[in-house]
């Protein structure tokens, strides 16, 4: 059935398939690509693929490698053309797309070297135009692209076609958007090292492909996916031009689909089954649409906004309003660990036991205080046994400039307290030389990564001290997958899961706080959450785990919607200032981008989201607080 004939998808201008996760989508697409290659091989014609880079297609490439190794899929008759390449990077650079494609795909299959095409980012500036014209000619000479694979950036770019690109644009040199460069900053060990220009296929080049599949994972892509699929085409969102293609599909996971009307507001596009969660979601939405507190919503408000059937099934408005108001009110608590010796029938957490053993998992230092710094302080002040577990060292996120300052400090201390041949002096001297000798694009040596990890440990201790957490209650796991990996290319294994399992069984918590459940699966937050998920599955039959509750907190990029929250922890202006001060201690994570570019510091984003959530609760007719941190209860899967 054509996806556009479905009532629930009537607003969608591009056929969009929602998958359980990225792997499920990539298995489907890899199977389709294999069938295409085999059909063309049988007809003795080449298969011409347009390929994308970045974290999004990595799982697809892994599936293609699997099909080659396990099912004999041959790529000898395949020609590939990559979308883009950074301008000014040699092919040997670890972040060049030439290197990426060989690392992630070409070195693992039997494709002839002559069949691989990636734009040349090293040609002299005067020769770029001719080089781009030649790239277009090679695509035409190959017979055009049979299938173009795309990802999508948060600016809505496809390839490096940033906002402002026209529908007719061809392969060319472009200037990268500030947000695009910011998103790439960690890959390049700092935003200052990210190239400012790239060569990219144009929108018109992409639209010439006979078939197009765009992939998107994680909630950070949800907004831009919804705009590209449901809004009118516009140059401010280049991906929206795909609406004009006769054979285009979007493959997205549930998180990336979460802003589509059929997911976020399904009652607007058809009949629905009114589950309790959907009822709350719709009433909160209605309150925000008409700008009335929940208790003031009228029957006509429901009817005029496509919710008459909800009134028929669950109304009238008066009773429905009271029910949802009470549900929202019961999420609010100043006692995130439960209030001892109190009626907990309408509270999100149990009164007993008290105190509770609490474990907070933070993927890297700073995620904890950014996402739940106010709640951390409350838990400690209310007498709970709180342990913060930093799953990774976070050393990949430290700019060289910060490390050089740390080396200078170590050298000064060594000079003051030991001889020039003492261990601290030798470490400072040798590591300082390595830092000064390395180029901005070189990977860090083991001593440099150790230094950067120690720097982040110090910041974490200072931040948690500001939240009342003692140094003895901090664990640094330094999981191996991170120490041997790079951003967007992590490969955790059984030992990493075992480390989390061991931590849980040692601490036997009554509460676990974690983050990353809806993030891009290649992100550090999602990788670390997956380890927690797998660990919870392993300990699910342990006697203590039956009494353990898992709460999810969110990062500054993707805050909770009010209707999703199961526990809302409010705090005062003074407590918000204390949280901000704790975040300040993570000085190595401060933005290097001028404020004039409109990019906010992490502490500013955290403040904004906490205040915005409080304002949302106020608008719904609940108590007026300075700030709120939100949490959702997560039910771990059963073992096996």
Image (cartoon, rainbow, N blue to C red):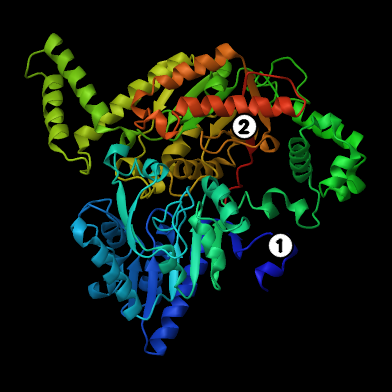
Residue at point 62% right, 55% down? 231
Residue at x-position 20% and y-position 17% = 409
Q: Tell me which corner region of the image, top left, top right, bottom left or bottom right, holds residue 111.
A: bottom left
Image position, residue 489 (x, y; %): 36, 50
Q: Is residue 85 visible?
A: yes
Q: Whole-percent x and y of residue 467?
A: 49, 16
Q: Nearer the viewer, residue 66 or 200?
A: 200
- Which residue is label 1 attached to? 10
Task: Describe the element under mark 1 as helix, strand or loop.
Answer: loop
Does residue 629 sit above or below 443 in this rendering? above
Pinpoint residue 484: horizontal percent, then vertical percent: 29, 44
Instruction: Reply above or below: 394 against 154.
Output: above
Residue 631 tag number? 2
Of tags 1 and 2, the one toward the viewer is 1
- Residue 73 figure quarter: bottom left
Q: Residue at x 8, y 14 (%)?
A: 419
Q: Position of residue 441 (x, y in %)?
A: 22, 44
Mark 2 lies on a secondary structure that is strand
Does residue 506 appear in the picture of this structure? no
Q: In the image, 433: left or right of 530?
A: left
Viewer-closest of 565 and 491: 565
| Residue 224: numbered disc | none
Q: Report the residue that reaches farthest toward the bottom.
A: 43
* Sooner in the amino-acid sequence: mark 1 or mark 2: 1
């Amino acid at each position: 059935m054509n996806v556009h004939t479905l009532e629930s998808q009537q607003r969608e201008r591009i056929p969009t398939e929602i998958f359980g996760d990225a792997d499920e989508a990539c298995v489907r697409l890899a199977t389709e690509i294999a069938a295409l290659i085999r059909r063309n091989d049988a007809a003795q014609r080449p298969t011409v693929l347009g390929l994308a880079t970045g974290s999004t297609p990595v799982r697809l490439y892994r599936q293609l490698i699997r099909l080659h190794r396990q099912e004999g899929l041959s790529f000898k008759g395949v020609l590939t053309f990559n979308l883009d390449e950074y301008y000014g990077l040699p092919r040997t650079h670890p972040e060049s797309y030439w290197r990426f494609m060989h690392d992630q795909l070409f070195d693992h299959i039997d494709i002839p070297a002559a069949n691989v095409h990636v734009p040349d980012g090293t040609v002299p500036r005067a020769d770029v135009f001719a080089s781009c014209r030649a790239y277009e000619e090679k695509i035409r000479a190959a017979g055009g692209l049979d299938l173009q694979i795309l990802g999508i950036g948060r600016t809505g770019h496809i390839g490096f076609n940033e906002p402002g690109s026209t529908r007719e644009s061809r392969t060319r040199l472009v200037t990268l958007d500030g947000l695009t460069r910011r998103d790439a900053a960690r890959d390049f060990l700092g935003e200052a090292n990210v190239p400012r220009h790239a060569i990219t296929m144009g929108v018109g080049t992409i639209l010439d492909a006979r078939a197009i599949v765009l992939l998107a994972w994680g909630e950070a892509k949800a907004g831009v996916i919804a705009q590209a699929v449901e809004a009118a085409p516009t140059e401010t969102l280049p991906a929206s031009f795909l609406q004009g293609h006769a054979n285009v599909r979007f493959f997205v996971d549930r998180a990336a689909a979460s802003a589509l009307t059929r997911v976020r507001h399904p009652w607007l596009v058809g009949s629905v089954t009114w589950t309790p969660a959907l009822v709350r979601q719709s009433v909160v939405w209605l309150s925000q649409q008409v700008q009335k507190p929940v208790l003031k919503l009228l029957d006509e408000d429901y009817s005029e906004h496509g919710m008459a059937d909800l009134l028929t099934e669950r109304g009238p408005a008066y009773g429905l309003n009271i029910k949802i108001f009470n549900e929202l009110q019961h999420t609010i608590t100043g006692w995130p660990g439960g209030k001892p010796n109190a009626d907990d029938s309408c509270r999100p957490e149990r009164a007993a036991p008290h105190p509770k053993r609490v474990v907070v998992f933070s993927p890297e230092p700073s995620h904890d205080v950014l996402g739940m710094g106010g709640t951390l302080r409350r838990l400690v002040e209310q007498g709970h046994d709180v342990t913060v577990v930093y799953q990774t060292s976070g050393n990949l996120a430290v700019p060289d400039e910060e490390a050089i300052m740390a080396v200078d400090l170590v050298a000064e201390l060594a000079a003051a307290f030991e001889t020039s041949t003492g261990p601290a002096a030798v470490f400072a001297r040798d590591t300082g030389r390595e830092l000064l000798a390395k180029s901005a694009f070189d990977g860090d040596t083991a001593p440099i990564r150790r230094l950067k990890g120690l720097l982040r440990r110090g910041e974490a201790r200072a931040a948690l001290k500001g939240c009342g957490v003692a140094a003895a209650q901090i664990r640094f796991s330094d999981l191996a997958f991170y120490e041997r990996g790079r951003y967007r290319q992590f490969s955790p294994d059984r030992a990493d899961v075992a480390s989390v399992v061991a931590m849980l069984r040692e601490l036997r918590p009554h509460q676990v706080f974690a983050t990353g459940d809806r993030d891009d699966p290649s992100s550090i937050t999602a990788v670390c959450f997956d380890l927690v998920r797998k660990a919870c599955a392993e300990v699910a039959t342990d006697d203590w785990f039956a009494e353990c509750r898992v709460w999810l907190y969110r990062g500054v990029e993707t805050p909770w919607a009010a209707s999703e929250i199961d526990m809302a922890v409010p705090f005062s202006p003074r407590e918000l200032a204390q949280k901000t001060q704790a975040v300040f201690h993570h000085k190595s994570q401060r933005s290097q981008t001028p404020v004039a570019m409109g990019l906010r510091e992490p502490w500013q984003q955290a403040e904004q989201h906490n205040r915005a959530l409080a304002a949302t609760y106020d608008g719904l007719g609940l108590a007026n607080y300075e700030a709120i941190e939100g949490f959702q209860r997560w039910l771990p899967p059963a073992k096996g």
